[in-house]
Amino acid sequence: MNTPALRQQIRLALEQEAATGQLARQLEQQLSGLHPSIQLPASDAHGVLQRFVRAYVEQVPDVLDAANSVARDAGIEAQVKPVLKLAEQFFLSPPPLMEGHHGLDALLDEAYLAHRLVEEVNDRYIAHLGQPLIPLDTTVANVIAHQLIGEPFANQLDEAVHHALDGMLNEKVFRQDSVQEYRARLSSPKTLAAWQNWPCLSRQLGVELGLPA
């Protein structure tokens, strides 16, 4: 995994954002138009939203490193590594539809691709094995990021994830003889314990989804 390159890319984007405030201004303009289900503390809504974006982006290399380590220890590296490399490539070699996006704004899009990739992989593993491959609770964070990125572009990013996975995780993958062995390893106490350090990202940062009153 080349996560040092990702961290360097993120560091440079954060420095650029600190100098320009471009994304901060964009987020401030979006506050009034956010879906009412996105609940932010009234006292510091803009600050919480900025910290959410920063953490959402910064968590990607940490998650990739952790997933790689857990997969190696659990004996499921052959299944996890291609997914992690694809998430990494979304940062290092973004798809053509990302052309023209720069700075932290671009990294939010790329982080969304990476987090949505993990979410989709987990959905497919749950459907076939009853267990997620990488049990991270990013669903709410991804919904919030989708809203911040905006439609229809976020939908295009979703399609890019689906297209990438169709060639990697098709039905044949889950019909292999070794699938039951992987299921046992996914649900082992050692594997589950290794993921306890990754609680819900959005909840950590004070951003929630709820039904409007």
Image (cartoon, grey):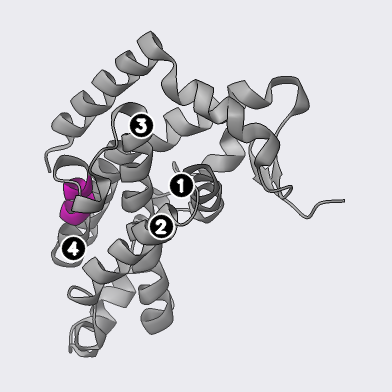
Q: Amino acid at mark 1?
A: Gln
- Disc on the earlier residue, 4 or 1: 4
- Residue position marked by numbered label 1 in the rendering: 196
Q: Amino acid at mark 2?
A: Leu
Q: Amino acid at mark 3?
A: Glu
Q: Spatial distance from mark 2 to mark 3, Cα to Cα? A: 23 Å
Residue 179, image x, y percentages: 24, 82
Q: Which residues are magenta?
A: 85-90
- Residue position marked by numbered label 4 in the rendering: 75
Q: Nearer the viewer, mark 1 or mark 3?
A: 3
Q: Residue at x 18, y 83 (%)?
A: 178
What crowding class fits label 2: few (fewer than 14 Cα within 10 Å), some (14-19), or many (20 or more)?
Answer: some
Q: Spatial distance from mark 4 to mark 2, Cα to Cα? A: 13 Å
Answer with left or right where residue 134 lies relative to residue 49: left
Q: Nearer the viewer, residue 89 or 63?
A: 89
Q: Residue at x 18, y 87 (%)?
A: 176
Q: Spatial distance from mark 1 to mark 2, Cα to Cα? A: 7 Å
- Residue position marked by numbered label 3 in the rendering: 58
The secondary element bearing badge 1 is classed as: loop
- Disc on the earlier residue, 2 or 3: 3
Is 189 placed above or below 208 here?
Answer: below
